[in-house]
Image: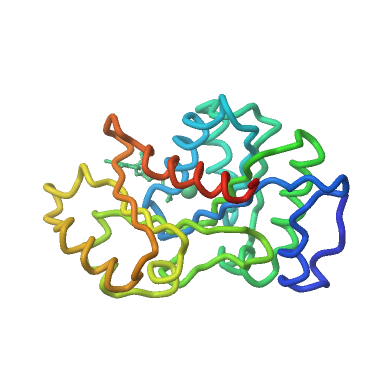
Amino acid sequence: MHLGHSHEGPAAVSADATRPDGTRRALRIGLGGPVGSGKTATVAALCRELRDRLSIAVVTNDIYTQEDAAFLLRNAVLPPERIQAVETGACPHTAIRDDISANLEAVEDLEDAVGPLDLILVESGGDNLTATFSKGLVDAQVFVIDVAGGDDIPRKGGPGVTTADLLVINKTDLAPYVGSDLERMALDAKKQRGELPVAFTSLTSAEGVGPVADWVRARLAAWTA
Ligand SMILES: Nc1nc2c(ncn2[C@@H]2O[C@H](COP(=O)(O)OP(=O)(O)O)[C@@H](O)[C@H]2O)c(=O)[nH]1
Ligand SMILES: [Mg+2]
Protein backbone atom coordinates (compact mmCIF):
# COMPACT_ATOMS: atom_id res chain seq x y z
CA MET A 1 0.00 0.00 0.00
CA HIS A 2 1.52 3.28 -1.07
CA LEU A 3 -0.47 6.34 -0.30
CA GLY A 4 1.32 8.78 -2.56
CA HIS A 5 2.84 10.60 0.38
CA SER A 6 5.71 11.99 -1.63
CA HIS A 7 3.47 14.56 -3.29
CA GLU A 8 1.65 15.61 -0.18
CA GLY A 9 4.62 17.04 1.70
CA PRO A 10 5.83 16.15 5.17
CA ALA A 11 3.02 17.77 7.15
CA ALA A 12 0.37 15.68 5.43
CA VAL A 13 2.29 12.50 6.16
CA SER A 14 3.05 13.05 9.82
CA ALA A 15 -0.62 13.72 10.50
CA ASP A 16 -1.29 10.20 9.26
CA ALA A 17 -0.55 8.47 12.54
CA THR A 18 -3.38 5.96 12.50
CA ARG A 19 -4.04 2.85 10.44
CA PRO A 20 -7.18 2.51 8.35
CA ASP A 21 -8.76 0.55 11.23
CA GLY A 22 -8.18 3.50 13.60
CA THR A 23 -5.37 1.95 15.67
CA ARG A 24 -2.12 3.89 16.11
CA ARG A 25 0.49 2.93 13.53
CA ALA A 26 4.03 1.97 14.54
CA LEU A 27 6.18 4.63 16.19
CA ARG A 28 8.96 5.59 13.75
CA ILE A 29 12.27 6.57 15.26
CA GLY A 30 15.16 7.86 13.14
CA LEU A 31 18.81 7.43 14.08
CA GLY A 32 21.30 9.83 12.52
CA GLY A 33 24.86 10.95 13.15
CA PRO A 34 28.39 10.83 11.78
CA VAL A 35 29.89 7.72 10.15
CA GLY A 36 31.14 5.21 12.71
CA SER A 37 29.52 6.75 15.80
CA GLY A 38 27.60 3.55 16.52
CA LYS A 39 24.21 3.93 14.83
CA THR A 40 24.07 0.35 13.53
CA ALA A 41 25.43 -1.00 16.81
CA THR A 42 22.72 0.96 18.65
CA VAL A 43 20.00 -0.37 16.33
CA ALA A 44 21.28 -3.93 16.84
CA ALA A 45 21.39 -3.53 20.62
CA LEU A 46 17.90 -1.98 20.71
CA CYS A 47 16.50 -4.88 18.68
CA ARG A 48 18.03 -7.41 21.06
CA GLU A 49 16.74 -5.55 24.11
CA LEU A 50 13.20 -4.86 22.86
CA ARG A 51 12.31 -7.64 20.41
CA ASP A 52 10.80 -10.01 22.98
CA ARG A 53 8.12 -7.53 23.99
CA LEU A 54 7.68 -5.43 20.85
CA SER A 55 7.09 -6.07 17.17
CA ILE A 56 10.03 -4.28 15.53
CA ALA A 57 11.31 -3.62 12.01
CA VAL A 58 14.36 -1.72 10.73
CA VAL A 59 15.09 0.39 7.64
CA THR A 60 18.76 1.07 6.86
CA ASN A 61 20.15 3.70 4.50
CA ASP A 62 23.52 3.30 2.79
CA ILE A 63 24.86 5.30 -0.12
CA TYR A 64 25.84 2.53 -2.53
CA THR A 65 25.69 -0.68 -0.51
CA GLN A 66 23.45 -2.55 1.92
CA GLU A 67 26.17 -3.09 4.49
CA ASP A 68 24.26 -1.98 7.56
CA ALA A 69 21.35 -4.27 6.68
CA ALA A 70 23.85 -7.08 6.01
CA PHE A 71 25.41 -6.53 9.43
CA LEU A 72 22.01 -6.72 11.14
CA LEU A 73 21.14 -9.87 9.17
CA ARG A 74 24.48 -11.52 9.95
CA ASN A 75 23.98 -10.83 13.60
CA ALA A 76 20.40 -12.09 13.42
CA VAL A 77 19.02 -9.24 15.50
CA LEU A 78 15.66 -9.65 13.72
CA PRO A 79 14.24 -12.12 11.17
CA PRO A 80 15.30 -11.09 7.63
CA GLU A 81 11.79 -10.08 6.57
CA ARG A 82 11.87 -7.32 9.22
CA ILE A 83 14.92 -5.55 7.76
CA GLN A 84 14.82 -3.40 4.61
CA ALA A 85 17.76 -1.59 3.02
CA VAL A 86 17.41 1.65 1.07
CA GLU A 87 20.32 2.50 -1.22
CA THR A 88 20.25 6.26 -1.24
CA GLY A 89 22.65 6.70 -4.17
CA ALA A 90 23.31 10.27 -3.02
CA CYS A 91 23.95 12.28 0.11
CA PRO A 92 22.31 10.26 2.91
CA HIS A 93 20.49 13.28 4.29
CA THR A 94 18.64 13.75 0.99
CA ALA A 95 16.84 10.42 1.48
CA ILE A 96 15.79 11.15 5.05
CA ARG A 97 14.95 14.83 4.71
CA ASP A 98 14.28 16.03 1.16
CA ASP A 99 12.99 13.11 -0.91
CA ILE A 100 11.76 10.64 1.66
CA SER A 101 9.69 8.54 -0.76
CA ALA A 102 12.03 5.51 -0.82
CA ASN A 103 12.13 5.42 2.97
CA LEU A 104 8.38 5.83 3.29
CA GLU A 105 7.90 3.01 0.84
CA ALA A 106 10.21 0.78 2.88
CA VAL A 107 8.34 1.64 6.08
CA GLU A 108 4.97 0.88 4.48
CA ASP A 109 6.24 -2.34 2.88
CA LEU A 110 7.40 -3.55 6.29
CA GLU A 111 4.08 -2.73 7.89
CA ASP A 112 2.28 -4.59 5.09
CA ALA A 113 4.58 -7.61 5.18
CA VAL A 114 5.09 -8.19 8.91
CA GLY A 115 2.74 -5.73 10.65
CA PRO A 116 1.12 -4.69 12.82
CA LEU A 117 4.38 -3.27 14.12
CA ASP A 118 5.00 -1.39 17.36
CA LEU A 119 8.28 0.24 16.38
CA ILE A 120 10.22 1.00 13.19
CA LEU A 121 13.84 2.13 13.51
CA VAL A 122 15.18 4.08 10.51
CA GLU A 123 18.97 4.37 10.41
CA SER A 124 20.35 7.18 8.29
CA GLY A 125 23.49 6.72 6.26
CA GLY A 126 26.41 8.23 8.17
CA ASP A 127 26.65 11.94 7.52
CA ASN A 128 27.85 15.13 9.10
CA LEU A 129 26.50 17.11 12.01
CA THR A 130 23.72 18.78 10.05
CA ALA A 131 21.67 15.76 8.96
CA THR A 132 18.19 15.61 10.40
CA PHE A 133 15.09 13.60 9.47
CA SER A 134 11.94 14.95 7.91
CA LYS A 135 9.06 14.93 10.38
CA GLY A 136 7.10 13.29 7.58
CA LEU A 137 9.30 10.21 7.87
CA VAL A 138 9.87 9.77 11.61
CA ASP A 139 8.03 10.73 14.79
CA ALA A 140 11.18 11.20 16.85
CA GLN A 141 14.89 11.29 16.15
CA VAL A 142 18.00 10.16 17.92
CA PHE A 143 21.38 11.69 17.10
CA VAL A 144 24.35 9.43 17.82
CA ILE A 145 27.85 10.85 18.30
CA ASP A 146 30.80 9.22 20.03
CA VAL A 147 33.50 10.34 22.40
CA ALA A 148 36.27 9.34 19.98
CA GLY A 149 35.00 11.86 17.42
CA GLY A 150 36.23 14.64 19.72
CA ASP A 151 34.82 15.97 22.97
CA ASP A 152 34.15 19.38 21.38
CA ILE A 153 31.29 18.06 19.19
CA PRO A 154 28.52 18.94 21.67
CA ARG A 155 29.98 22.46 22.02
CA LYS A 156 30.00 22.93 18.23
CA GLY A 157 26.26 22.28 18.08
CA GLY A 158 24.50 21.88 14.73
CA PRO A 159 20.90 20.74 14.22
CA GLY A 160 21.52 17.09 15.20
CA VAL A 161 23.19 17.89 18.50
CA THR A 162 20.87 20.79 19.28
CA THR A 163 17.43 19.59 18.25
CA ALA A 164 17.35 15.75 18.24
CA ASP A 165 14.79 14.32 20.62
CA LEU A 166 17.58 12.26 22.19
CA LEU A 167 21.32 12.88 21.92
CA VAL A 168 23.37 9.70 22.41
CA ILE A 169 27.05 10.11 23.29
CA ASN A 170 28.40 6.61 22.61
CA LYS A 171 31.67 4.75 23.25
CA THR A 172 32.23 6.15 26.74
CA ASP A 173 34.56 3.15 27.25
CA LEU A 174 37.01 4.86 24.89
CA ALA A 175 37.09 8.20 26.75
CA PRO A 176 40.26 7.44 28.77
CA TYR A 177 42.13 6.37 25.62
CA VAL A 178 41.26 9.38 23.49
CA GLY A 179 41.40 11.97 26.27
CA SER A 180 37.73 12.94 26.04
CA ASP A 181 36.25 14.75 29.02
CA LEU A 182 32.75 13.30 29.56
CA GLU A 183 31.77 15.92 32.13
CA ARG A 184 32.59 18.69 29.71
CA MET A 185 30.62 16.93 26.98
CA ALA A 186 27.62 16.69 29.32
CA LEU A 187 27.85 20.39 30.23
CA ASP A 188 28.21 21.48 26.60
CA ALA A 189 25.30 19.26 25.55
CA LYS A 190 23.13 20.74 28.31
CA LYS A 191 24.02 24.25 27.15
CA GLN A 192 23.04 23.42 23.56
CA ARG A 193 19.94 21.37 24.36
CA GLY A 194 18.37 22.80 27.48
CA GLU A 195 15.91 20.23 28.81
CA LEU A 196 16.22 17.79 25.87
CA PRO A 197 17.67 14.46 27.08
CA VAL A 198 21.21 13.14 26.62
CA ALA A 199 22.24 9.48 27.07
CA PHE A 200 25.82 8.33 27.58
CA THR A 201 26.33 4.77 26.35
CA SER A 202 29.00 2.16 25.94
CA LEU A 203 27.76 -0.72 23.87
CA THR A 204 30.68 -2.85 24.98
CA SER A 205 29.72 -2.58 28.68
CA ALA A 206 27.06 -4.39 30.69
CA GLU A 207 24.70 -1.42 30.86
CA GLY A 208 24.97 -1.13 27.09
CA VAL A 209 22.05 0.43 25.28
CA GLY A 210 19.87 0.51 28.43
CA PRO A 211 19.38 4.31 28.66
CA VAL A 212 18.34 4.49 25.00
CA ALA A 213 15.98 1.53 25.37
CA ASP A 214 14.36 3.24 28.38
CA TRP A 215 13.85 6.39 26.33
CA VAL A 216 12.31 4.37 23.46
CA ARG A 217 9.94 2.62 25.88
CA ALA A 218 8.85 6.00 27.29
CA ARG A 219 8.26 7.44 23.80
CA LEU A 220 6.27 4.38 22.85
CA ALA A 221 4.14 4.59 25.99
CA ALA A 222 3.35 8.23 25.18
CA TRP A 223 2.69 7.35 21.51
CA THR A 224 0.16 4.63 22.26
CA ALA A 225 -1.46 6.36 25.26
N1 LIG B 1 34.57 0.64 21.89
C1 LIG B 1 33.35 0.77 21.40
N2 LIG B 1 33.12 0.52 20.07
C2 LIG B 1 31.86 0.69 19.61
C3 LIG B 1 30.79 1.10 20.44
N3 LIG B 1 29.67 1.19 19.67
C4 LIG B 1 30.03 0.85 18.42
N4 LIG B 1 31.35 0.53 18.37
C5 LIG B 1 32.14 0.12 17.18
O1 LIG B 1 32.27 1.25 16.33
C6 LIG B 1 32.30 0.84 14.96
C7 LIG B 1 31.26 1.61 14.16
O2 LIG B 1 29.98 1.27 14.63
P1 LIG B 1 28.69 1.31 13.68
O3 LIG B 1 27.53 0.93 14.52
O4 LIG B 1 28.92 0.54 12.45
O5 LIG B 1 28.64 2.87 13.31
P2 LIG B 1 27.66 3.65 12.32
O6 LIG B 1 28.47 4.00 11.11
O7 LIG B 1 27.27 4.89 13.07
O8 LIG B 1 26.50 2.78 12.02
C8 LIG B 1 32.06 -0.66 14.97
O9 LIG B 1 33.30 -1.30 14.85
C9 LIG B 1 31.42 -0.92 16.33
O10 LIG B 1 31.68 -2.21 16.81
C10 LIG B 1 31.06 1.35 21.84
O11 LIG B 1 30.20 1.73 22.63
N5 LIG B 1 32.35 1.18 22.23
MG1 LIG C 1 25.63 2.21 10.19
Quadrant of the image occupied by residue 51? top right
Residue 172 screen position, x and y as percent: 23, 46
- The answer to whether residue 127 is above or below residue 171 is below
Q: Nearer the viewer, residue 89 or 47?
A: 47
Residue 156 screen position, x and y as percent: 29, 75
Count of numbered circles in the view: 0
Q: Residue at x 47, y 61 (%)?
A: 165
Q: Residue furthest front?
A: 225
Q: Residue at x 57, y 45 (%)?
A: 220
- The answer to whether residue 180 is above or below residue 189 is above
Residue 151 screen position, x and y as percent: 21, 63
105 relative position to 207: left or right: right
Q: Residue at x 58, y 46 (%)?
A: 121
Residue 125 visible here: yes
Residue 65 visible here: no
103 relative position to 162: left or right: right
Residue 224 screen position, x and y as percent: 65, 46
Quadrant of the image occupied by residue 155? bottom left
209 relative position to 30: left or right: left
Q: Nearer the viewer, residue 41 or 90?
A: 41
Quadrant of the image occupied by residue 184? bottom left
Q: Nearer the viewer, residue 143 or 34?
A: 143
- The answer to whether residue 136 is above or below residue 212 is below
